[in-house]
Image: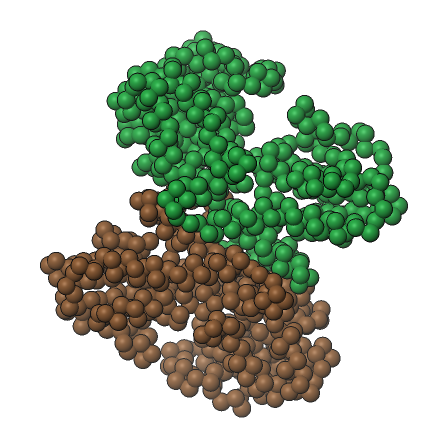
Chain colours: A green, B brown
Amino acid sequence: MTDLKICVIGLGNVGLDLAINFSKKFHTIGYDINKSLIEKIKNQKSKHLKISKNGVGLEVSCNHKLIVNCNVYIITVPSPVNKKKLPDLDNIIELTKLISKFIRIGNILIYESTFYPGLTEEIFIPIIERESKLKLNKDFYVGYSPERINIGKNKRLSNEIVKITSGSNKKASKIIDSLYKRIIKAGTYNVESIRIAEAVKILENCQRDLNIAFMNEITKFFNKLNLDTKKVIEAASTKWNFFQFYPGLVGGDCIAVDPYYLIFSAKKIKHDLPLVRLARETNEGMVDYIYKHITKAISNLKISALAFFGISYKENCKQINNSMYLRIIQKLEKNYKVDIYDHFVEKAQPESNFVRTMECANKKYDVIIIGSKHDEYKKMNFKKFLNKFGTIIDIHGISMYPKNKIL
Amino acid sequence: MTDLKICVIGLGNVGLDLAINFSKKFHTIGYDINKSLIEKIKNQKSKHLKISKNGVGLEVSCNHKLIVNCNVYIITVPSPVNKKKLPDLDNIIELTKLISKFIRIGNILIYESTFYPGLTEEIFIPIIERESKLKLNKDFYVGYSPERINIGKNKRLSNEIVKITSGSNKKASKIIDSLYKRIIKAGTYNVESIRIAEAVKILENCQRDLNIAFMNEITKFFNKLNLDTKKVIEAASTKWNFFQFYPGLVGGDCIAVDPYYLIFSAKKIKHDLPLVRLARETNEGMVDYIYKHITKAISNLKISALAFFGISYKENCKQINNSMYLRIIQKLEKNYKVDIYDHFVEKAQPESNFVRTMECANKKYDVIIIGSKHDEYKKMNFKKFLNKFGTIIDIHGISMYPKNKIL
């Protein structure tokens, strides 16, 4: 099995980590169409980019010619939704077509993107068969193994998380499982069908979305009662079977997106998932809720300068994809000029050149809004950026200035 | 503090356990209006009913004359809802009035029943002040410390669970906390107000209700897709932050009731809690869902005898209060004669004399339905009660006959 050549397609958080792990055991190709990302990886991860004498190691490229002659292709690109919140599979379909050109007898194609149950079999397998003129389970095999990584401060590396594996038949399932077993320290959990593996990932993320939505719903009510939800949650957490979720803004590529895949798949068979839908509506609605509370708090102030600190969708990380803080800022910008600061995002240039660096935070603001719950904000002296009669609004109440907290 | 005389009012699951625990440290009176319950306790728990030389020990009685001269009164009776799903506080109001007659300077009255945030202060404190002519925090004190016990096989004794404590002022809160600290091995968690303590308990139970409702919603969908939800849940449970809930019928006095208290309290201020409401609707709706699947499975059969095994609302326990299995049986009884078996409930005579003892299970049935997930059912040979062409419907698919499972 060491002779295998593995190709990981999509070198974002998920793919790059996976490719590095595989490259310790196999000859691994990391492919991404994003040229500047490939350059960045070549600079930042150069120590990983070595091929040993026995052929084991990692090569990264944006040239698809490099991906020929691989045995296993793994697609790790995100599965987003479009503006109508419907699955947008264009990217994965394109990549599937690309791989179909190269796929040969005995090859395996594995998806790690989040799908609804049945998607791989309904959409991707027919594409591969049509484009490659090969036959599933006779000429080639398909697998599904959802990524489960966690970014931010409590980051878990991919090989520290049990990996769900599945395949298009028993033989494929077994091979795929043993493949991941080689690199995942935490072990694997092989399920009997691709559909079950697809269902597992989406269930996990819908559960999280729902539980955060519940805390948002409760917070809105407790705020009216003048009850501090956080104190309630902390006390409830002393019960062994209580699950500690906090109210918050759900962004990113997973929890804020995956439920729409499940909703879409239910709609296809005219089935309704009211709780899953309502959880999404509740969490999406938090933008308006917070915006309303901000405007109420500052409506009587004379504001010439407003700063927003912390825009990444999750604390202690630089990701701003689908960040709800950006949506709040968008609304604020209709009436105010907003200066944006985030020391995590600041480093992730050039995508985020709208973010000011902390070094130029030498001006004073009438209003400071604290968004993402970055650890640094807990002890930061925000007052040094504040005008004498200025106001601090700390959305999550994490700083030393929780007077105007909202959640 | 050893001189304290503690009176526990209501000797159900919660109260009796609490009274026994307190009686190891203090002179404790257990009071219940149910005469036959007192007799039963006297027979079954006689070893606990001893007063030592230093006055420590337990007395139980249905005579309210015995509850005079106590220092601490603890109300542990359930807080149910009426047929309209509105809080039914009659019982607790009556008991509060009764205690108000006896309460003296320096006494403490503690509630353990589940309330919505604010209920103790809005309803019970005014009653005590009016009836006793005493003044809160001057003459007497009030506390709130929600019970958190767990019945059934995975039973946790009350002193193995961290106890939330609170009081009407700092002094009371401190005394109440140290009181429970004496008997709770797991320790206490003192919160700053009665309202927070009330919110904690109701939050815990609403969270459970919602998470079970989510699994019910998912199961109904996955059933349509021919996907085995249990296999999905088991696989998802390999993720560190997934919370293992299963689909099911939510009965009993807590999870199926408490959310209505929160909904009621929100309605009072014209606030809506759509997720909490929808969770209740989903879980209540499972009676019809299961009934529909049962009737579909047996509609073409000629049935002269039908048996239902397992009616307690939770597995491995005898409690049938608010059991959804009984509601399913009610529906079935419109068309069929149903023989009911439950070896847990069977022992809990005489309330349950409609339950047949296993010894008289010597007849054969055309249909056997398996309800509660009692451990014994997992290995039970149900076929010996079944006619040759009979059908077994195993609602949860826990037995050796999962062919007709529903959840």
Q: Is residue A234 above or below residue A24?
A: below
Left or right, A113 with reference to A344: left
Indicate left or right for B388 with A13 as reference.
left
Q: Where B68 falls versus A13 (above or below)?
A: below
Which residue appears farthest toward the top when viewing the image? A53
Q: Is residue B346 above or below residue A173?
A: below
Task: Pick the residue in front: B401 or A159.
Answer: B401
Residue B153 drawn at (x, y percent): 38, 61
> Where residue A75 sits in the image (x, y, percent)?
44, 25
Please name the residue shown 77% across and 35% down the image: A339
Residue that appears at 47% across and 58% down = B279
- The answer to whether one can see residue A163 in this image is no
Identify the residue at image location x=53%, y=91%: B65
Residue at 62% across, 59% down: A221
Q: Position of residue A156 (x, y in %)?
A: 53, 35
Side (left or right) of A154 relative to B290: right
At which x and y percent is residue B180?
Answer: 58, 69
Residue lying furthest right in this view? A388
Question: Does residue A403 show up?
Answer: yes
Q: Residue furthest bottom?
A: B65
Q: Quadrant of residue A350?
A: top right
Looking at the image, which is closer to me, A294 or A207? Answer: A294
Q: Quadrant of the N terminus of chain A?
A: top left
